[in-house]
Each structure stands twice: as C-alpha cells, then as structure tokens.
Image (cartoon, helix red, strand yellow):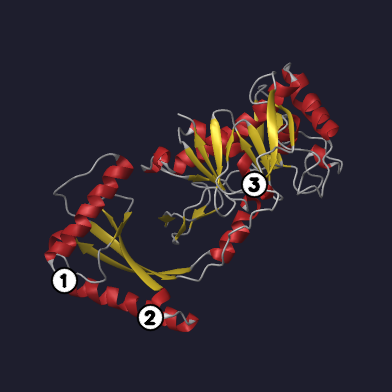
Amino acid sequence: MKFTRETWIGEQYTGHMTGLSAVDIKNIGAGGGSIAWIDSGGLLRVGPQSAKSFPGPACYGQGGTKATVTDASVVLGHIDPDYFLGGRIRLDHGAAVRAITDNIAKPLGISLYKAAHAILAIATDNMVNAIRSITVNEGLDPRQSLLIAGGGAGGMTIGRIAELLDADRVLVPRTAGALSASGGLFSDIVTEFSVSRRADTRNFDYDGINADLAKLDAQIDTFFERIGTPEDQQFREFFVEARYPHQVWELDVPLRGSRFTSRDDVEAMIEGFHAAHERVFAVSEPGQGLECIYWKARAIARLPKPSLLRQSSAAAGAEPLSVTDAWFGSDTPEKTPRYDGPSLAEGMVLKGPCVIQEPTTTVVVFPGWNALVLHNGDYMMTKEA
C-alpha cells in the first residue's frame, strides 16, 4: 500500500493540494456504464461520461440508447444476457447491438464486433495507463506484482490489462463485484500520527527526534486504549519523510525501530532512503546526507477475520453450462464454454477461452490464460508460457 501527502481536492495540479496524508489511490471513469462516443476528430473515446444506474447501459432496457462498456461485453458474448446479477435481471441483447451499431460502428464504418472490441480496448487502455502512473512511474514493476480485479466488470477486463502490463498472474475474488464493501468489513483499523521536525543526518538531533518519537508512541498507546485493542492485536510502524538536501519531494522510509540509539540506526535510515530513491527515480547519491522533514507512526489494530471458505457444491464438476460464441478481437468468434462459478470444485483448472459466471461478477478467461479455482472460491488466472 502506498501513502502520499499529495492529497488533492479537485483535479491534480488544477485543484487544491491539502498536504494531508492518505492512501494513494488513482481512479478513472472506465466502469461498465462508461459511454463510448466519437469526438470531433473522428476518434473513439470511452468515458468519463457515464450512463449511470438510470437509464444505464442500453442493454438494461430502461431507455438508454448510448453505447457503453457493458453493451460491448454483451455483444461480444462475454456477458450472458440471461445470467446478469445471478439471473435476476435479463439484459436486452438487441438494444446493445443497436446502440453500438448506431453510435459507433456505422459512423466509423466498421463491423459491429470490431466496434464492440474497440470500446473494450480503449476502456482497458485507460485503466492500464492509470496503473502505469502509480507503478512504472513510481519505480514499481507490475510484472513482479499480483494484479487483483475489483468491481463487477473487473473480471472481464483484467486479463487484457495483465497482458498489456506484461504481468502473468491475476487474482479475481469471487466477491469482486462487492470488493470495496468486503474490504471495509475485513480491513484492519489503521491510523497515523505525525510530527514535523527538520533534522539533518550529518548533525543528527538524537534527543529531539527521540522525544518526538516518544510522543508518537504515546499517541498510539492512547489510540489502542480508546478502541480497546487487545495487546496481541496491536502493531506499530515508524517512518520518516526525507529528501536529499534542497529537493522538493520527500520519500517515505521505514525506520528499523522506534528510537535512535546509535549512529548505526541513522546509517540504516540513510541506506533505506538511498534504496528507495534508486527504486523510484533510478538514481541515488551514496554518501549524501538527508534532510528529514516529517516523523510518522502508524498504529494497526489487527482484527479477527471471518472465514471466506466456500463449501463445494454436491454437484461440483467441470461440465460447462453451455458453449457459446464469444469474440476476442476479430470478426471470427471462438466457441467458449460458460461455467457456473459456485459449482466449481477447488483445484479445478479451466483453460481459456472460457467464461465463469458468478452471482455478482463475470470472469473472462482470455485465450492463452488458465484459471485455477482456489480453496475459498476465488480464481487465480495465469498466463500460459
């Protein structure tokens, strides 16, 4: 998890930067209701305009006429119109076809399926660019990360996102459609305290810094006492926001303890900063001192987690519900099995292309990918060598 003090109200660089510490999250308008449109230069765009929940995508049958990402997924056979929201809603395939034909395919002079694929491709590219901005641009390699799909439509696009990022592992929770709500229920309680004190590592103020760290420690004690956290569930971490002299931006560096007892502790902090600077900016200055600006303490109350294990169905098996046509980038469809997710047994491996239907999400396993059913009913997708 990446934290930042660059918290903006409004758009980045054009809004107002508060300087408050927060989890660094980037979001873009690329959900299932994002509207596909053609700009004045004749280029296809997707979002940020949204069809919202009402009237929603054209396939919802609530009067919407604009083409959306969900309509494209219906046309391409990635979403079963008869099994939306676990079969509680029946989508209008014909309305999705008309919306994409009238708004995108005819104006661009391309086929229905190429238009639908282009909508998904552009929405996916928008998400990939957002991921790159917080990984590659920050010195993180997405190829060394596990991608997690969130949102009801996350499982339909995550395979393509992974391919563009050259990643080969993807986790799709069976609760992806309610991932944010699940995260709120399962997350630990975390709070952060900070104090501002400028310190130079070349003439380190041990007494002043240790006094500030002791104050932060006491604030954590008060926090744990106030919320009644058992001692074995209490965890604390200490950080410094530091920079090379006269730089503008600081980097977070974890401290190896809650106090500085010797020069070795200071040197460990300096080496940690060099490593972080090398990772983020591909350059470091060994031997250079640091300016320390903020000292932070993070209190973590680890909460008991309920079990997410799903009991296997008595009728568990690998037989698909049906085999239908689905498109993955061309006018030629591929025969694609559709599986009922809740009935799949642990350890089963499904070879792409296929579609796994969960009550609150749809998982599209693209050609060249496999999906392993995990013990809790989630899916680990891996790219074939």
Judged from the image, the secondary structure of the residue bearing numbered disc 2 is: helix
Instruction: Report the mark closest to the observer, 3 or 1.
Output: 3
Residue at the image position 23 percent from the left and 57 percent from the top: 291
Residue type of the residue flagged with mark 2 = Asp
Point out the tag, 2 or 3, that comes first from the N-terminus. Answer: 2
Residue type of the residue flagged with mark 3 = Leu
Residue identifier under label 1:
261
Please tell me how crowded label 3 is: few (under 14), some (14-19), or many (20+) other residues with Cα within 10 Å.
many
In the image: residue 293, left or right of residue 44: left
Residue identifier under label 3:
344
In the image: residue 5, left or right of residue 110: left
In the image: residue 169, left or right of residue 57: left
Q: Where the C terminus falls, by quadrant?
A: top left
Please tell me how crowded label 2 is: few (under 14), some (14-19), or many (20+) other residues with Cα within 10 Å.
some
Mark sitting on residue 221: 2
Q: Where the N terminus falls, by quadrant?
A: bottom left
Judged from the image, the secondary structure of the residue bearing numbered disc 3 is: loop
